[in-house]
Amino acid sequence: MTGTRSSRAIPYDALFDADFLESVRHLRFVARRVDRRGRFAEQRSRDLGDGIEFRDFRPYAPGDDFRAIDWNIYRRLGKVFLRLFEQLEDLPLYIVPDVSESAFMETPPRARAGLRASLALAAISLNQHDSVGLLPFAEDLRMVQRPRAGKGTLPRFARRLAELEPGGGTDLVASLARLRSLRLRSGVVAIVSDFFDPAGIDAVTEALRGVRHRLVLVQLVRATDRAPDLTGNVRLRDCESGTGEDVSITSDVLTRYRRAYDRFDEGLAEFARTSGAGLVRLDCDADIVPQLAGLFSAGTFNA
Amino acid sequence: MSFAHLSGASVLAGLAVLASVLFLLQRLRVRHREITVITTQFWREATEEAQARVFVDRFRHPLAYLFVLLIGALLWIGVAGPRRDGGDGRDHALLLDASAAMAWPGRFDAAQESLLATVAALPRNRTTVVLCGARPRTLLLPGENALLLEERLRGSAPDACPETITRTIRDLAATANEGSPLAIRVFGDAPLPMSRIGLLPDAVDVVRDEAPSAEGTNTRITTLGVTAAASGSWTHVDILVGATGARISATLDGIPLDGIAVEANGASTDGLTIFRDVPANGATFSVVLDDGGAVTGDDRASVILPRRSLLTVSLPRDAPAALRRALVLDPAVKIVESDALVVITRDADTIATARAGLLLSDQSGGGAAFVVHGTATEIEAVRTSTTDPRALRDALRDLALDQIDATSLATDAGRAIELAFRNDGGRYIEVWESLFTDAFDFTRQRAFPLFVARAVRRAAAIEDIVPLVAAGETLPPHWGPLTDTEGHTLNAADGALRAFEAGVHTTATGKRLHVASLYVAPPATAADEQVPDAPSPGGVPFDLALLAGLAGTALLCGEWLLYRAGRMP
């Protein structure tokens, strides 16, 4: 968890390349349900209407479209039934990457892995005609790109990601409150972050419970998060708040540290289990695509 | 600066200071290394670090302090090198014999090993080691680390010289601290006769280190001498060679002798061989033993032969007949009319030009009967001889003037017969011509032909045959101090001047002196009782400093590993 501070956005070429985009094409999200108000896409919606895949019959009700009446049933049974087809709609994916100072500090920065993962998720979603929105957060959350679909969206999305600058400290609680206030169409919210909010894991999970979207938590981790490579007497300075902690590294201190980290880690995992959110742990020092491929082992990932 | 050999009190004081410094360092607030991290929330939970800005902290890690103190103490002991004093309160002088006798195979190496073992067992702050070769040299001073001795001994070898142990013992006894007993231990074969050791002060104790007996047999050259040829030939010399029990081979400038008459006198023990009428041409005469035995240093000897050629002399046609007759009878002289090496004349200008010869002066002139003209060095040596008449006596002897009957001459002359020396750079003798006539009985004295011969040889700058002495042989004191070919002055501090080193040396009067590499043992009589052997040191001593240093280093490495593993603060 050590490194050098960087105040610059990560160059586009360092983030994305064609091979990377190609490698995530075969991955896809499948939502359990999508919102009624969505756009035609490949996600199953609650709407039964103009689709091409037969789903069910139901008795006719005044106001129904005559074109949906199954006249064969009427001839056989003398009752009017409608043929119902499943309407395929789009699944809005709201990608919420962490662009706080800490994400850009280490070498390589966690933001590199986070933004690559964000683009991979966006590419997956756009490939199946879903819409993707970008809402980076640090001390607050802001809408950088409203949900869009279409072939031209991915390059634009990539440029937007590459333009993201470090944005101060981490306040995930406030950012999620802002997300709720945006009243977005129900979809999937993918939060890509280390989740190191000074408010603590309890406050973070509490804020996450308030999100009414399906949640995918992409946790950016490093091996040194749990086993820091530190010895001796050190003054640890928080890269965001600037506060210092004097620590004499001993085996006892390291044990207590690991215990605290495990509590944090378990808190996040417990939230994912109980809330049905997806939790993905990405090792920032390893290649992103193989890790994502492991998660999409069956070709799909149910959010 | 060396911390080696501190006293026990100093070491303890150092340990106390070390413990105090480490304690204070423990109390001092830790200077933290600042590291920027992405979050400190887990560290906040993990640490109990006091945040107050105070100069000193509570004593936090007593076990770590004790561990570091142990490491520091061990390293300090390793550096300080405390050593238990020998306990007898004596100074120790260890003398390593490096004389020719130690060239016997394995003898010198065995003595060195024994010396090193003994040094390790003795208190270093009271031990001196001296290498007793041709010029005794101190190898280790009190307080110096014994490791230096091993380094300084590297490459040392016995010199071609007799023993210098007894001389060194005498010097040490003379310079020993008053009231401080001195134990001298000798490593080597040098004889230690009680007739000499017994004269030392009571506070000086001399013992010999036990040494294994020498193995093998040795033959050596015992004698090498050059003298004028018995045949009377001026241009040849006779050479005497003595060797024990082996055939010798002789060469002249590396070329085997051919056509030289050899007279052998016994060949078993101390066989003497005389080489007759060897050309005196300045060549180097060398003899080598065909089977030298165990010791190689005494198997070879050489001498530079004098260079002899006939001396050309010119003299007036009406020169005194006695003088001419003496010259004709001299085998080294050839009388010529011109281009003579030596000029005999009555003309002062002629002799001043030739600068070498005999000037026949007029008795009525009032000058001294004999006036020796010479160089500044030569004349000055004679003039300053009032305190040491031996130089004047040598000068008289060189011209055989010490053998003339001066009283008779004075009676005939009616005045004193005077001898004067004049420093004018010439090399001639001014003498009354009348002394060569019947008015005086000088020509009838037996010293007369000798005077003429030596005057001619002096004028021709013919040196006597270079004296050849054996190493260790006592020399006339006024020859000293001797200097070797490199200009080093050879010490004659023991009162008697000896040539200790083989080679060519120069005496104080400028004469060359050949010192043959022949070992001359000091005379030992049956009544001489040797000093007792000393017991050998009891095994390898326990080197606390070394072990402490090693242990401290090992613990330091362990501490570093623990620190890296996060198990040490």
Image: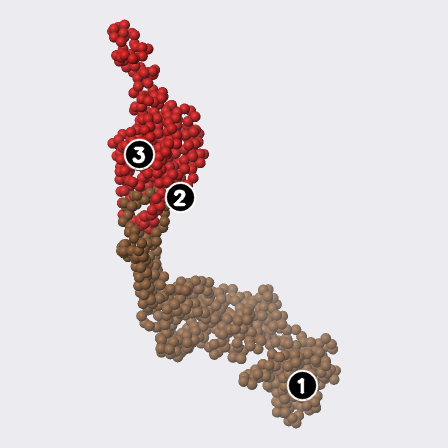
Chain colours: A red, B brown
Along the viewing direction, whichever of B292 and A153 lies nearer the viewer = A153
Q: Is residue A105 visible?
A: yes
Residue marked by disc 1 = B431
Identity, as a three-letter code, of the amino acid under mark 3? Ala
Residue marked by disc 3 = A177
Q: Residue at x 61, y 85 (%)?
A: B401
Along the viewing direction, whichever of B505 and B87 lies nearer the viewer = B87
Identity, as a three-letter code, of the amino acid under mark 2? Thr
Q: Label 1 crowding class (10 Å Cα cut-off): few <14, some 14-19, many 20+?
A: many
Q: Secondary structure at mark 1?
A: strand
Q: Say which mark, if any, is on residue A4.
A: 2
Are dots 1 and 2 on a single chain?
A: no
What chain is tagged by disc 2? A
What chain is tagged by disc 1? B
Image coords of residue B521 (percent x, y):
46, 73
Quarter of the image for residue B207 reads bottom left
Q: Is residue B278 rendered to the left or right of residue A141?
A: right
Quarter of the image for residue A186 reads top left
B245 relative to B523, above or below? above
Q: Label 3 crowding class (10 Å Cα cut-off): few <14, some 14-19, many 20+?
A: some
Image coords of residue B283 (percent x, y):
60, 68
Along the viewing direction, whichever of A202 and B208 lies nearer the viewer = A202
C-alpha separation, residue under disc 1 versus residue under disc 2: 108 Å
Circles 3, 2 touching at the beta carbon (< 8 Å): no
Q: Is residue B188 rendered to the left or right of residue A73?
A: right
C-alpha separation, residue under disc 3 versus residue under disc 1: 139 Å
Q: Secondary structure at mark 3?
A: helix
A109 relative to B70, above or below? above
Q: Is residue B527 visible?
A: no
Are dots 3 and 2 on a single chain?
A: yes
Q: Is residue B307 rendered to the left or right of residue B204?
A: right
C-alpha separation, residue under disc 3 versus residue under disc 2: 31 Å
